[in-house]
Image (cartoon, rainbow, N blue to C red):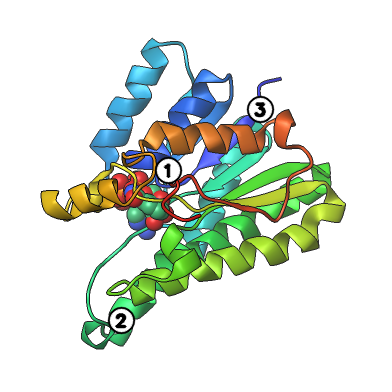
Amino acid sequence: MAKVALVTGASRGIGRATAEAFARAGYQVAANYCRSKEQIEQFSAQMEREGCAVIPVQADVSDPEQVERMVQAVQQQFGHIDVLVCNAGIARQGLLTDFSPADWRQMMAVNLDGTFYCCRSVLPGMIRRQSGCIITTSSIWGITGASCEVPYSAAKAGIIGLTRALAKEVGPSGIRVNCIAPGVIDTEMNGNLTPEVMAQLREETPLGTIGTPKQVADLALYLAGEGASFLTGQVISPNGGFLI
Ligand code: NAP
């Protein structure tokens, strides 16, 4: 029986590459999106033409009821969920003093609360089956902190804490929980960075390049597989040596 993966934020960037990698590896993939219906439908149709199963599922991950409905629908359609990849996220730059309490709440709601809601909804099924794998998404800024990205850094640091604590809690139920903390990856999220800033980031990276969504997706696929069966509670950072 094909394994089932739910990937959040799969309409573009790292999430889309992750959904594609899992689908090409033979998983049935539920690809979550929030607003980008047209993009996800095009992606799903393209994967179907190639004989891969990628089913779009809409939900705003910052809304626990929408997340619960999404997880129930995926479980009804596929029977169960083997792998959850919590990838959906938002970022915003600015001085801390320029962030309103509502801006702060939004940053936490999508990045951190969204991860909590998705884990909370998939776990009962995984615990019943005594098997499952959860991959969360932090950032190098969640490890080191970034100037002018304090709310994002705080949310992403929270995801690391959630990952480590949850790995301890659900390890005895046969469920592994690991965190990917990417360095700078070529996606729309970095579309607002100037060419000069991107060039500087490349220069500061020992491997001399920024990362691709596929490089992060391949790591997620590895973490979900047999080769990573003794890995849990870990934070792994594909960053080209930016943080050593
Ligand atoms: P991206 O290109 O901006 O894509 C973000 C994805 O998240 C989209 O599919 C978007 O879907 C989805 N999303 C946003 N808000 C959502 C919500 N409320 N509910 C459900 N989905 C939502 O970002 P990316 O660069 O691929 O980043 C993916 C993850 O990696 C994020 O968690 C990000 O923080 C993390 N990360 C990225 C980098 C980087 O350099 N790119 C580095 C470190 C960590 P819709 O368009 O449908 O709303």
In the picture, measured across the screen, residue 210 lies left or right of residue 110, that is: left
* Percent of width and height locating residue 28: 56, 26
Q: Nearer the viewer, mark 1 or mark 3?
A: 1
Q: Is mark 2 on a helix, strand or loop?
A: helix
Which amino acid type is shown beneath numbered disc 2?
Ala
* Percent of width and height locating residue 195: 12, 48
> Residue 151 appears in which quarter of the rendering?
bottom left
Give the quarter of the figure containing the N terminus.
top right
Q: Which of 181 and 68 is in front in this view?
A: 181
Q: Is residue 123 above or below residue 18?
A: below
Residue at 63% across / 38% down in the picture? 223
Q: Which comes before the other along the chain, label 1 or label 3?
A: 3
Could you say which disc has been placed on residue 3 in the image?
3
Mark 2 crowd level (few <14, some 14–19, many ≥20, 10 Å Cα): few
Mark 2 highlights which residue? Answer: 102
Q: Which comes before the other along the chain, label 1 or label 2?
A: 2
* Percent of width and height locating residue 76: 62, 37
Which amino acid type is shown beneath numbered disc 3?
Lys
Q: Residue furthest right?
A: 172
Mark 1 highlights which residue? Answer: 240
Label 3, ligand 1: CB separation under 8 Å? no
Q: Nearer the viewer, mark 1 or mark 2?
A: 1
Q: Nearer the viewer, residue 168 or 141?
A: 141
Q: Disc 1 versus disc 2: distance between alpha carbons?
A: 34 Å
